[in-house]
Structures are given as structure tokens and as C-alpha cells.
Amino acid sequence: MIIMKMIKVVQGDITKMKVDAIVNAANTTLRGGGGVDGAIHRAAGPELDIACARFHGCNTGEARITPGFRLPARYVIHTPGPVWHGGNHGESSLLHNSYFNSLQLAEQNQCETVAFPSISTGVYSYPLDAAAQVALTTIKDFLQTSKSVQTVFMVCFDSQTLAAYQQAYQQLGIQ
Ligand code: AR6
């Protein structure tokens, strides 16, 4: 059987995605916030914060998994991306770690479909074009050897983010 693995760049609201796991651009407390984190906590319901509290935080670039509760997604994978401090503070490797560790958790939990938001490019100010390169390169490399994870969605909230990821996608020559 031939299985086509793929990355799909789409525009939309990640809380509506019917996938095995959505990824949350969290902060190191894992106790909710604004942006996509706030939207995910509101849509999942208060059980999500109770589940997150048990982790007592999470370091930047690491990831933790919870159920999706009231979301259409089965799981939420929470990862604090790096705050942009000019680019010489390990930002790109920390951002790589956020994507890689999230995908590893998805794989360990037998997820076939995973959806990411654009981690760190909102409140954390990571430049969009550079973030898109790191995100898509990490996902593409991971899919080369993944067994369970088949389809990864990049869910872009606004048209500027969509354009940046579409451009990076073409530059990387994906599919
Ligand atoms: N679906 C998809 N993407 C979304 C949604 C949504 N519903 N809502 C916003 N975005 P940000 P960060 C996009 O700021 O930069 C939080 O307070 C948004 O337009 O949410 O990693 C956390 O608690 C942008 O493109 O995350 C942290 O304190 C992208 O998601 C901090 O913000 C990421 O923007 C994390 O900052």
C-alpha cells in the first residue's frame, strides 16, 4: 500500500480542525493566555486548564499532551515557542524543538493527522518568513521517517501568515 504523506498549508481557525491533534502555541506556565492559546482554552472548556495544571509548566521548545475535551481534535499538544530576542539567542533551534517535540508526541500517541498554528509569530514576535522556513523544514524532515503521522496542516489565521507559509512551501520544493 502506498501512503502519501503531506503538508497542507491552509487558512483558518485551528480550534475547528477535526484532526487527531492540534498544537497550541503556549507559554511556559501552560495555564492559558491570549492569541491561539486563549482560543484553544475557550473552545476546549475548563477541563483543559485542569489537565495542564498537572504539568507544573513546560520549558521552551518542549511539549506536553492532553485530551482535546470539547474540541473536535482528540488531543492538544502544548509547546511554548521562543520569544524573539533578535535571532542570536538560540531562537531557531528552540523553534525547531517546538515543532519536532510536538510531532514526536503525536507519533507516540498514534496520531495520523496533526495541525499546527504559526508558533511564536504573534505575541512572541518571531519574524514570519524565518519562522515559516523552520516550521516547514522540521515538518518535512520528520515526515520522511514518521510511521503514524501522515498529514500535517499548517493552519494560518490571517492572509499575511498564509502568504509567508505558501512562499516557504514553494521555496522548499515540497511535493
Ligand atoms: N487559529 C489559528 N491560528 C491562530 C488563532 C486560531 N484560532 N488565533 C491566533 N492565531 P500567538 P505566540 C495565530 O500570539 O507568538 C499567548 O498569550 C496568530 O495570528 O497566539 O507563540 C501564549 O499564552 C499568530 O499567527 O502565539 C503565549 O504567552 C499565531 O497564531 C504567547 O501568546 C501565533 O500567535 C505565545 O505567543
Image (spheres, rainbow, N blue to C red):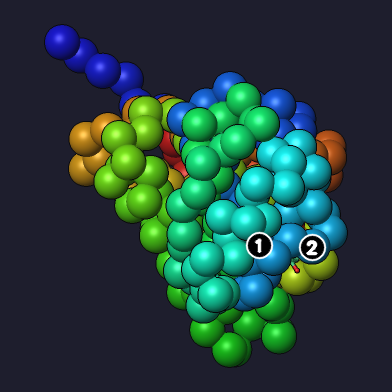
Residue furthest bottom as drawn: 89
Residue 101, given in percent of the width and then of the height, sits at 40, 60
For residue 33, which numbered disc appears in the image? Answer: 2
Q: Quadrant of the C terminus?
A: top left
Kind of residue at badge 1: Ala
For residue 87, which numbered disc appears in the image? Answer: none
N-term mark: 1 or 2 = 1
Q: Residue at 38% across / 44% down in the picture?
A: 106
Residue 29, given in percent of the width and then of the height, sits at 65, 74
Residue at disc 2, secondary structure: loop
Q: Quadrant of the N terminus?
A: top left
Task: Examine the image and state in which quarter residue 126 appears.
Answer: bottom right
Kind of residue at badge 2: Gly
- Say few, some or many: other residues with alpha carbon within 10 Å of mark 1 (under 14 / 14 to 19 / 20 or more): many
Residue 33, given in percent of the width and then of the height, sits at 79, 62
Please state if 95 lies on the left or on the right of 100 as rendered: right
Would residue 31 be seen by someone viewing this image from the given angle? yes
Residue 65, given in percent of the width and then of the height, sits at 46, 52
Q: Is residue 147 above or below residue 58?
A: above
Please state if 75 lies on the left or on the right of 11 as rendered: left
Q: Is mark 1 within 8 Å of ligand 1?
A: yes
Task: Examine the image and state in which quarter residue 169 appears.
Answer: top right
Mark 1 in CB contact with mark 2 (< 8 angstroms): yes
Please state if 130 lies on the left or on the right of 61 as rendered: right
Q: Is mark 2 within 8 Å of ligand 1?
A: yes
37 or 41: which is nearer to us? 41
Residue at disc 1, secondary structure: strand
What is the spatial separation of the Cα atoms under label 1 and label 2, in whole angstroms? 7 Å
73 or 160: which is nearer to us? 73
- Say few, some or many: other residues with alpha carbon within 10 Å of mark 2 (under 14 / 14 to 19 / 20 or more): some
Q: Residue at 63% across / 56% down in the picture?
A: 50
For residue 26, which numbered disc appears in the image? Answer: 1
